Every structure is written in structure tokens, then in C-alpha cells.
Amino acid sequence: MAEARDVVRIPDAKVALSTASVYPESTATAFEIAARLGYDGVEVMVWTDPVSQDIEALRRLSDYHRIPVLAVHAPCLLITQRVWSTDPWTKLQRARAAAEKLGASTVVVHPPFRWQRQYARDFVDGIWRMANETDVRFAVENMYPWRYRDREMLAYAPDWDVTKEDYRHFTIDLSHASTSRTDTLHMVERMGDRLGHVHLADGRGSAKDEHLVPGRGDQPCAEVLEGLARSGFDGHVVIEVNTRRASRAEAAALSEGEGTGRHVERYLVQFWPAKS
């Protein structure tokens, strides 16, 4: 009979695929791949793909593939400055509405760019106001300084290190932690029980946000997963990796059970009891 210390508690967390992981392929492709590989759901990155912006189209994809939308990533990127309005608060309101209509529990949001001065001044209080109006979690994501050669620019406000502010929920992105050259495990510790969402990826500490497949960089992906499993984490673990250099043949192999998709799954099986 196993002793109590040997019993592994299966986490309640679900494992999802970010639609950003198939870029430059479409949002629809992400749903198909997530269903074929057995993910628990998807996180929809709202960007320039019209389908990612269309709630009814997303609902049809979800129903057809029988794969739920677990999270909505608000359009916070430089390339999405005009998606769902140019007003950042309108973007968040629409992201919340999308999450509510699709049954997603989380909206992922980046801290403002420094040049969004009024938005940045009001951001912390505004996120709290919006969080108090819904059951959807607004999980603010850690970012990183922008670097070029020997220069560093602080592009986000109040700070790229979101643990310096008082937010109800956080998203930790391990690729962003690598780019910022911060101690990921200490960041997870600072987030504590406010950590509600994880973007699982890897990095090598370069100035470029790499989003490598877990195990191909120097981030403590295994340690993070093991710690979440021990703590009873009930948020989402989202695979957000860069496959832009994958060939069409590799993309086809991914959907047939080889390549990046299965590499990630083998990694999760090893370190995440819910997938074993």
C-alpha cells in the first residue's frame, strides 16, 4: 500500500493550445490541431485573423471540433493596435464579452505600453474595476524590457514585472521570463495563489521573445509544472510555442502525432500528472 507521501494528486488544471502556436496558420487550424492531439481546450489569441475576432465563428469552431475555448487573449500586441477599436479599455470590454459568451474563464492581458499614458495611469485600478464586474479572471501577464545591442528600453507601464503591482490574477509566460532574464521560480513564488494562468514555453535568455518548445531552452519548465501539481493549481496551462519555421510537412506531421505537438505532449506526460 502506497504511503500518503507517495500519492500524487491529479491537478484540476486543464492543458490548452494557444492559437498563436500555429501562426502563420489560421485560428481554425489551431482548433483542428488541438482536437486531434487531445488538448483540453484552446486559448484564442485575438489578432488580425478575422476568425479570431468573430465570436460566432469561434463558437462554431468550438462546437464542430468539440474543443472548448478556455481563455481569450485580448489584442494587446503592436500588430493589433486597431483590432476591436483603438481604445484599450474597449478592447478589454470586448475580450470580457467574448469570454463570457464562449464560456472561457480567463482573459489574458498585457500591461500597457508606456506611450499609452492615460491607460497606464489607470490600468491597475481599472483592471480591478473590470474584475469586480464579472466572474471572468483578468490575468495580467509578465513582459520584458526591449533590448537592442547594449541598449534597453522599458516599454511597459507600470512595469514589465507585473508582480510589482497589485493584481487579482496573474499570467506567467516562461518565454517572457527568459527574455527579461528574471528568476522564473521566484516570480512564480511572488505571484503565489494569484497565479491563475500559465503560458508554457522555453527560452535561452536572448533579447528575442523565443517561445521555444519546452525542454529546448534553459527555463525551469519541469520545476514549474511540478510545483503547480503539488500546490493544486486549478488554472490553465497553455502551450504557446513558436512554430513559424516549421515546414508544411512538419505541420502535417504534427497533426498526425509527430513533431512539435507530440514532443510537448511527452514533456507534459513526464512532468504533469493530469496528462499521464
Image: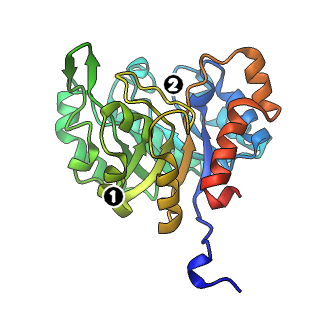
Alpha carbon distance from label 1 to label 2: 31 Å
> How many residues crowd mark 2 within 10 Å: few (<14), some (14–19), many (20+)?
many
Q: Is residue 62 left or right of residue 155?
A: right
- Label 2: state its secondary structure: loop
Q: Position of residue 53 (x, y in %)?
A: 55, 29
Q: Quadrant of residue 60?
A: top right
Place of residue 171 in the rendered image (x, y in percent of width and height, measured from the top left): 41, 47
User: What residue type is disc 1 on?
Assistant: Glu
Q: How many marks?
A: 2
Camera-side mark, 1 or 2:
1
Please give the name of the residue rendered at 18% of the width and 32% of the height, measured from the top-left corner: 118
User: Is residue 144 or residue 23 the one in the foreground?
Assistant: 144
113 relative to 201 in the view: left or right: left
Secondary element under disc 1, as helix, strand or loop, is helix
**What residue is rendered at 59% in x and 30% in y?**
21
Q: Which residue is mark 2?
A: 47
Q: Residue 245 in the image: state x and y as whole percent.
A: 61, 16
Q: Residue furthest right?
A: 256
The numbered mark, 1 or 2, whose residue comes first in the sequence reads 2
Q: Tell me the amino acid under the disc marked 2.
A: Trp
Does residue 61 appear to the left or right of 226 in the view shown? right
In the rendered image, which quarter contains the C terminus? bottom right
In the image shown, does 143 or 250 lie closer to the viewer? 250
Q: Which percent across, then down, holds residue 23?
A: 60, 22
Quadrant the N terminus occupies: bottom right
Q: Which residue is mark 1?
A: 189
Q: Identify the residue at image location x=52%, y=54%.
A: 225
